[in-house]
Amino acid sequence: MQGAMLLGALDPARRAADIAAYRAAGLDPLAMERLPRITRAQSMDILSSQSNLAGYKAVVDAAASYGRAFPMMMTAAGTVSPAKLFVMGVGVAGLQAIATGRRLGAQVSATDVRSATREQIMSLGAKPVFVENVAGIEGEGQGGYAGEMTAEYQAAQAELVSSHIAKQDIVITTALIPGRPAPRLISDAQLATMRAGSVIVDLAAEAGGNVEGCVAGENVVRHGVTIIGAVQLSRTLAADASALFARNLYNFLAAFWDKDAAAPILPADDEIVTAIRPS
Ligand code: NAI
């Protein structure tokens, strides 16, 4: 065990004592969720592989708890209107949620603070809904991450959401800010304007939730709207989650593999290594 690497989502910010204990036991703990968002690290990225599955499952879970159909159906007995689905936060999970909603036949719209996502939303056949009067984050944002927005932006976003959300049947929220509580995107008052029977899946539940009243790991009904406080949804797709996670770790080890040593060698000054080795 001496000198062995310990790879995983180790959460060093909250588990500093565990990290110290691993080191005391002679292990080299590596927090894989801290990989930088650079091209070289893409195939190793455990957050992306799991978020992608979570985005898909969020829509499937929403469809299961929604008491109506997603696609438009024109039948002899009458027409079923398509569900209106709104995705808030268009990162990895949000993009997959858009794609899944479209496949199920919903009318999909989506929003983000990063301007680069507008084109991505349109390329998936969904409608972008953006704050127009206050500048958001240019392009991809630093390292693909969003930051806390100004009070002015938050007010403009709240107004935009208020006018849009009352017409939605399904909302999937995914907005996260690294190292900070999740931004609050839907207030209780906005929730009250939605039609009873609507469903919200909050993928940011564990980080405090994007939706007021969301409880991580529980389904809460407020004003007739079901709020699903989703926690690590990829776990419910265990076979795929494990296969992708294992492939991420394999890609990491392969990238640093040293033939002569017959072991991975991690250069201390490598951008990937410095990011994942807790200080
Ligand atoms: P994330 O999980 O940190 O956040 C989810 C989304 O919420 C982001 O798109 C973010 O902009 C958005 N958001 C934050 N605050 C918001 C607010 N107040 N209102 C609306 N939306 C808000 O992001 P994720 O999914 O990890 O990826 C973000 C970007 O990074 C993507 O463009 C992705 O392609 C890129 N990426 C690149 C990787 C690589 O090159 N190795 C690996 C992972 C992601």
Image (cartoon, rainbow, N blue to C red):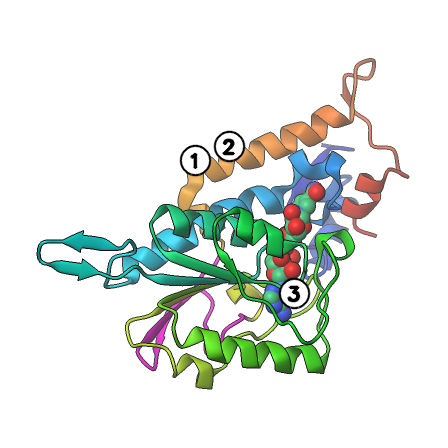
Give the amino acid type for the residue marked by disc 2 in the picture. Ala
Mark 2 and ligand 1: say if the CB distance to the nearest ligand atom is below 8 Å.
no
Give the amino acid type for the residue marked by disc 1 in the picture. Ala
Mainly helix, strand or loop, the magenta region? loop
Give the amino acid type for the residue marked by disc 3 in the picture. Val
Residue 246 x %, y %: 57, 32
User: Mark 3 or mark 1, which is nearer to you?
Assistant: 3
Q: Quadrant of residue 267?
A: top right
Q: Is residue 269 above or below residue 219?
A: above
Q: Circle 2 sits on which residue?
A: 243
* Residue at 73% over, 43% down: 30
Mark 3 and ligand 1: say if the CB distance to the nearest ligand atom is below 8 Å.
yes
Q: Secondary structure at mark 1?
A: helix
**Magenta range:** 209-231
Q: What crowding class fits label 2: few (fewer than 14 Cα within 10 Å), some (14-19), or many (20 or more)? A: few
Q: What crowding class fits label 1: few (fewer than 14 Cα within 10 Å), some (14-19), or many (20 or more)? A: few
Q: Which mark is residue 113?
A: 3
Residue 154 x %, y %: 64, 78
Q: Is residue 113 above or below residue 249?
A: below
* Residue at 42% over, 48% down: 100
Q: Is residue 36 left or right of residue 216?
A: right
Task: Give the alpha-carbon distance from disc 2 to disc 1, as whole Å.
Answer: 6 Å
